[in-house]
Amino acid sequence: MSDALGWRRLGAVSAYFWSGWGAVASLLLFCALWEWGALHHGPLVLPGPSAVLGRLGELLASGLAAPQLWISARRAFSGLGIAVLAGTVLGMLAGRSLTAALVSRPLVTLLLGMPPIAWLVLAMIWFGMGDATPVFTVVLACFPLVFAGAMQGARTLDGQLVDVARVYRLPWRVVLLDVHLPHVASYLLPAWITALGIAWKVVMMAELLAASDGAGAALAVSRAQLDMAGSLGWIAAVLGLLLAAEYLLLEPIKRVIERWRAADA
């Protein structure tokens, strides 16, 4: 038994490090293709990775980048947090009722089909320039995706497991953590990760068009000045924060849940 547990832990650790090396290898391959494109098109069209990272280092060292990135991160995670909380709770509640699922399905389809730029235009009219416009747009862009994932997870839960838990009169906390969570999380986590990427894209677009601060507004200034290295530097900074949020926040949660499900199986 102990040998099997030891081999299982060793396999989990190996898989963790292998996934990290795979991510690094994919990033290095991307940088290699980027460098090839820079050599082919020239620095005026596509600066290379070293020039972009150097420009980003200058922005960070000068103190210009950190406040703008913080503003964008605050807006992105504020909208994402509202969308994740509301979408998860309401989606799981809708998944428990067939009537609620049928009623909400066309509304979710409409929200998913609504382009974020349309919500942005409406938000600019309603809220003007400020935090409310990007946060509102992020919420409406991410909410239907999270809602759909939570509802699908709740709808596909095996009813026999719930009946067994009810027969044995298990505490609600045990039912929630050991019955509902492992199953619903397999639908929720991909939706959360996708919503994280959407949140950053929407915030950058909203700041580019309807804000005077943030990384998107700084990107607009770099574009107006034809500073390609600076523009790509801001993009690289935002993508770096996106990867950090996924691999330092969501990926550990995913691994804990998957390890829990494997041990429970």
Image (cartoon, rainbow, N blue to C red):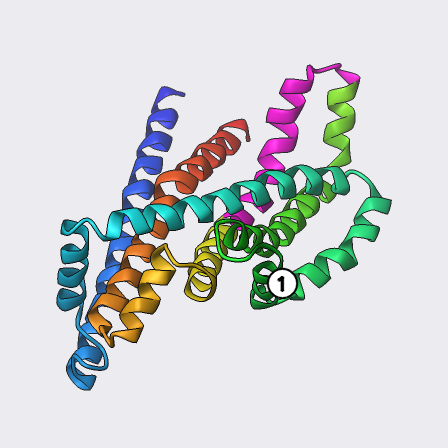
Q: Which residue is mark 1?
A: 122
The kind of secondary structure element at disc 1 is helix
Using the rendered view, name the quadrant where residue 150 is placed: top right
Horizontal and vertical percent position of residue 230? 22, 66
- In depth, the one of 64 and 161 nearer the eye is 64
Q: Residue at x 25, y 77 (%)?
A: 226
- As drawn, the residue found furthest toward the right would be 99
Q: Which quadrant is the N terminus positioned in? A: top left
**Nearer to us in this view, 100 or 237:** 237
Prevailing secondary structure of the magenta residues: helix
User: In this rendering, is residue 179 above or below 186?
Assistant: above
Q: Is residue 158 visible?
A: yes
Side of 263 relative to 241 (left or right): right
Magenta highlight range: 167-192
Answer few, some or many: residues within 10 Å of disc 1's Cα (few below 14, many 20 plus, some between 14 and 19): some
Dot 1 amino acid type = Leu
Residue at the location (15% across, 52% down)? 62
Tell me which corner region of the image, top left, top right, bottom left or bottom right, holds residue 89. top right
